Amino acid sequence: MQTILITGCSSGIGYATAHYLKEKGWRVIASCRQAEDVQRLQFEGFECLQLDVTNSQQIQQAFEYIQTSGGLDAVFCNAGFGQPGTVEDIPRDALREIFETNVFGCWEVTNYAMKIFRKQNYGRILINSSILGFAGMHFRGAYNSTKFALEGMADTLRHELHGSNIYVSLIEPGPIQSKFRPNAVIKLHQYIDMENSFHRQAYQQQLARLNTKGNANPFTLPSTACAIACYRALSAKKPKARYQVTFPTKLFWWLRRILPTPLYDFCCRKGGG
């Protein structure tokens, strides 16, 4: 039985992927930031650890557990969140928080996994990116930046792993059913002074979009779509560098390659809502 560690399993993509891979016969070591979510997943029958990816000690403890409980074949760095806001309104504290989770946590988890994979000369690294990892859209500057950073990290690591039996793949979702939007609203209120912003009126429109019940985007897919992409990457003899999930992600990937920058920028502004 193959073993995978998945970060950020309390809901959404991580939760769906944990269920899907378990059904496919994988030994899934799920992890969550909050103790109550760990207990919930353990009650559901998962092998689940408390792992806040901003906590280096918890990352170390998780890998100590892994090394003494049967090893590791793959890791899915999924933990992350969104921070809405214009670039001019995002304070440094907000940037520190989102980079600690979305980038630095992923980087450190990958470093620990690589120690295992180098010794055994095989392994799979999956990193949850986004359409916003290559299409910079407005009001998402902080999140865009973390996902662009992950894309650069993954591309570099792929070069460094050339010729080995260790593969790295980016999972690039677009609109997916999850708690992403409600969580983003919390961060918007936490860090952005909307009332005194130049973009005050635009923020009201963004709040209306983020608070929309149901799916704000007609191309929204269930979280299982990302789980299926992860399984394809894990099952392939030579996995692809990128797995685009949802129609908008596939569309914008090709638009970026064929359109001149001004026209592509126009599409991003329209597509960004």
Image: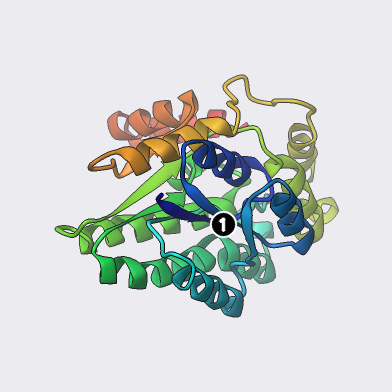
Compare residues 262 and 253 and report the one nearer the observer: 253
Task: Give the image location of residue 104, x and y in percent.
Answer: 51, 69
Tell me the residue at 74%/62% (across/down): 34
User: Looking at the rendering, which quadrant does residue 265 occupy?
Assistant: top left
* Count of number-bearing discs: 1
- Figure check: 88 above or below 112: above
The percent position of residue 237, horizontal first and vertical second, equals 23, 41
Instruction: Tell me if I can see residue 189 in this picture.
Output: yes
Residue 198 at least partly seen = no
Query: What quarter of the picture does the C terminus occupy?
Result: top right
In this view of the protein, which residue sits in the foreground, 111 or 38? 38
> Which residue, as the protein is rendered here, is positioned at the far right?
195
Residue 131 position in % (x across, y down): 48, 39
Q: Is residue 120 above or below residue 83?
A: below
Q: Which residue is mark 1?
A: 7
Q: Residue at x 30, y 45 (%)?
A: 241
Q: Position of residue 266 (x, y in %)?
A: 47, 31
Helix or strand or loop: what does disc 1 sit on?
Answer: loop
Amino acid type at circle 1 is Thr
Quarter of the rendering containing residue 52? bottom right
Residue visible at 49% across and 67% down in the picture: 69
